[in-house]
Image (spheres, rainbow, N blue to C red):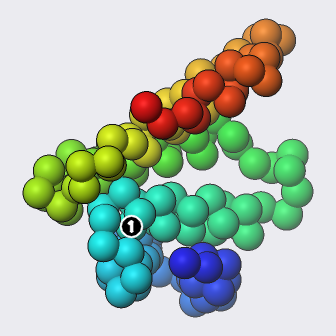
């Protein structure tokens, strides 16, 4: 799913983030049958909305954005929208878990201790 047109629409015609998330979930249901795919559409849309709302990279609160995305992913994964019956047998990815790893990497960079390339790649290896 291509999120930029939706993010641009929500940027031009603002609505509550909760309402925008619901719209994205409804739109994603047309082409994505698994909850993890719909959740990643919501997360992608939120990131694009955040980038559209800030004029420069200096204005972006990366830590705050990651916190917000983690909260969204955690809430969605714990909701009735994300039941075990909806998941496929190979769907073991936790979007909230991936965002948590991004938060850890961001914290490490802030402390001047960047992850090695191998560790970053290993982080996203699905087992």
Depicted 8 relative to depicted 33: above or below: below
Residue 109 appears in the picture as rendered? no
The C terminus, quarter of image = top left
Q: Where is residue 103, by image quadrant?
A: top right
Q: Position of residue 11 (x, y in %)?
A: 64, 80
Q: Position of residue 50 (x, y in %)?
A: 65, 61
Mark 1 Cα within 10 Å, few/some/many (few <14, many 20+)?
many
Q: Where is residue 51, by image quadrant?
A: bottom right
Secondary structure at badge 1 equals helix
Circle 1 residue: 38
Q: Position of residue 40 (x, y in %)?
A: 47, 59
Q: Residue at x 14, y 50 (%)?
A: 84
**Is residue 60 left or right of 75 when viewed as pictured?**
right
Question: Number of numbered discs present?
Answer: 1
Q: Residue at x 88, y 57 (%)?
A: 56
74 or 32, which is in the foreground?
32
**Is residue 108 left or right of 99 when viewed as pictured?**
right
4 or 2, which is in the foreground?
2
Residue 102 appears in the picture as rendered? yes
Q: Residue at x 74, y 21 (%)?
A: 118
Q: Position of residue 96 (x, y in %)?
A: 41, 40
């Amino acid at each position: 799913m291509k999120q930029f047109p939706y993010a641009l629409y929500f940027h031009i015609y603002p609505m509550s983030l909760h309402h925008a998330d619901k719209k994205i979930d409804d739109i994603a249901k047309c082409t994505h049958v698994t909850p993890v795919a719909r959740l990643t559409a919501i997360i992608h849309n939120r990131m694009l909305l955040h980038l559209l709302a800030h004029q420069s990279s200096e204005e972006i609160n990366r830590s705050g954005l990651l916190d917000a995305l983690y909260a969204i992913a955690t809430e969605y994964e714990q909701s009735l929208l994300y039941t075990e019956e909806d998941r496929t047998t190979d769907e073991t990815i936790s979007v909230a878990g991936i965002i948590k790893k991004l938060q850890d990497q961001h914290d490490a960079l802030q402390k001047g201790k960047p992850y090695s390339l191998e560790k970053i790649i290993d982080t996203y290896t699905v087992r």
